[in-house]
Image (spheres, helix red, strand yellow):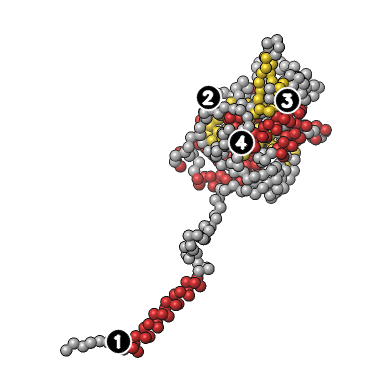
Amino acid sequence: MATTLTRTPHKTLPIIFLLLLVLVTLLFSKRTLEPHLPIYTSTDPYNPLPDPQIPHPNSISTEKTPILEPKSTDLELLNNDSVLKNETGFVESESVDQNPLVESNSDESESVKDDDLIVEKSSVLDDEWVKKSVDWGRGCNMYSGKWVRDDGYPIYKPGSCPFVDEAFDCQANGRADEDYMKWRWQPDQCELPRFNATDFLVRLRGKRLLLVGDSMNRNQFESLLCMLYESLPNKSKMYEINGNKITKGRGYFVFKFEDYNCTVEFVRSHFLVREGTRINGQGNSNPTLSMDVIDKSARRWKRADILVFNTGHWWVHGKTSRGKNYFKEGDYIYPKFDAVEAFRRALKTWGKWIDKNMNQNKLVFYRGYSSAHFRGGEWDSGGTCHGETEPIKTGRIIETYPPKMKIIEEVIQEMRFPVVLLNVTRSTNFRKDGHPSVYGKNVTGLKKVSTKKEDCSHWCLPGVPDAWNELIYATLAAQTN
């Protein structure tokens, strides 16, 4: 006979009660842990919890720096060529880019690996960094200071750089004294970081740096090439893309740095606005300058990531300074026009172009007027600076400030785009010793050097323009560190 098993009520009720107790305990435990454990996240699709915002270690600070950025929207040194076309306000033609940067396809194609980048960037912050603990961009005016003798200079030895053209190669042209190369610019309130060419190139990786202006910017361009060339272990990986040798006759150069996939370029533009010609009543061709039209080379400016502009010295020469039948607006040529007012209008044209064509991913410098030191006449009337071997220490010239610089400051302050003014005027006031003077030409044998025309405007290399590039490097370091 089969036996039937049945549960009695006194056994079933405790089991049910125990299960309910366990369930309630679990529910309350989860709710108690919710505020403290990240594993419990919202599943509401209409109100999700935000992802934590972790700054990238190489991200660029957007903190405003009133000294380095006169007016500011945030600047980022990113490789972005997304400039809107046809917004210049001027008629100009677009051209095909003859210098596309090559995109790297693998980490192995780069000579500097990611681990090295961390070391290189942090090495700038060692004991050669800002030694007086100054908060960069707030407490350091880099343009107020003095020149101090430093036997660690020059950054590159004379004769070691193949990119210095004859006009600036003073030692090769017979200059015997060397002390003019031994001076370092020191701001009053801080120490500049020592120039680190490798770190400079790391910051420039994948970008284009373009200098636009007259022969003074070519002076600075050659200086920068030499400063960067000095650091390269394999110097064959730096070259002008068309094989062009630097001369004053050519107006466009592009130097490629293969290991960093970047370029340093120069475009000649004497005035930043458009030069032209007119045919007079006698059928002769005369030059003109359109104050309201940007220079034709502007189509190249758009493609750069970092730009350094200048103009100034051509405004005091011949036809420009006289202003007769030369300055033009629209189709009208002024019979007589003031050169200083023409400079103001030209700079405003440049400023409007920058405002319309530069975006937040661009970095734009304007390098201020560098001082000339003619004694006994101007550049074309017997002025001289021969025999000067050390900086000026006292005197009125140190405090002289050209009217052109006041105009530049006013124009930049009126602009929407935050142009960085490299105000080297006062620092160059001291340096009467830094010009080629009679050593702008190579003289061989026992031939006597001619003193009929001296160059007291440009600068010997190595020399003063190296300090301008140190200021650019300090600005980049200040913005990113």
Q: Position of residue 477 (x, y in %)?
A: 62, 44
Answer with mark 3 or mark 4, whichever residue precedes in sequence: 3
Q: Residue furthest top?
A: 282
From the viewer's perspective, is 107 left or right of 269? left
Q: Secondary structure at mark 3?
A: helix
Q: Which residue is mark 3?
A: 315
Image point (62%, 42%), residue name? 476
- Give the amino acid type for the residue marked by disc 4 in the picture: Asn
Question: Is there a contact, CB below 8 Å, between mark 2 and mark 3?
Answer: no
Residue 92 in which image quadrant: top right
Mark 4 and mark 1 lie on one chain; the one further toward the N terminus is 1
- Residue at image location 49% in from the left, 72% down from the top: 31
Q: Quadrant of the N terminus?
A: bottom left
> Which comes before the other along the chain, label 2 or label 3?
2
Query: Between marks 3 and 4, how big is the CA–CA gap?
Result: 25 Å
User: Badge 1 is on which residue?
Assistant: 7
Q: Which residue in the protein does label 2 denote?
A: 243
Dot 4 crowding, Cα within 10 Å, few <14, some 14–19, many 20+: many
C-alpha span from label 1 to label 2: 100 Å
The residue under label 2 is which amino acid type? Gly
Q: CA distance from mark 2 to mark 4?
A: 31 Å
Does 403 sit left or right of 219 as displayed?
right
The CA span between labels 4 and 1 is 88 Å
Residue 375 or residue 336, whichever sits in front? 336
448 or 201, which is in the foreground?
Answer: 201
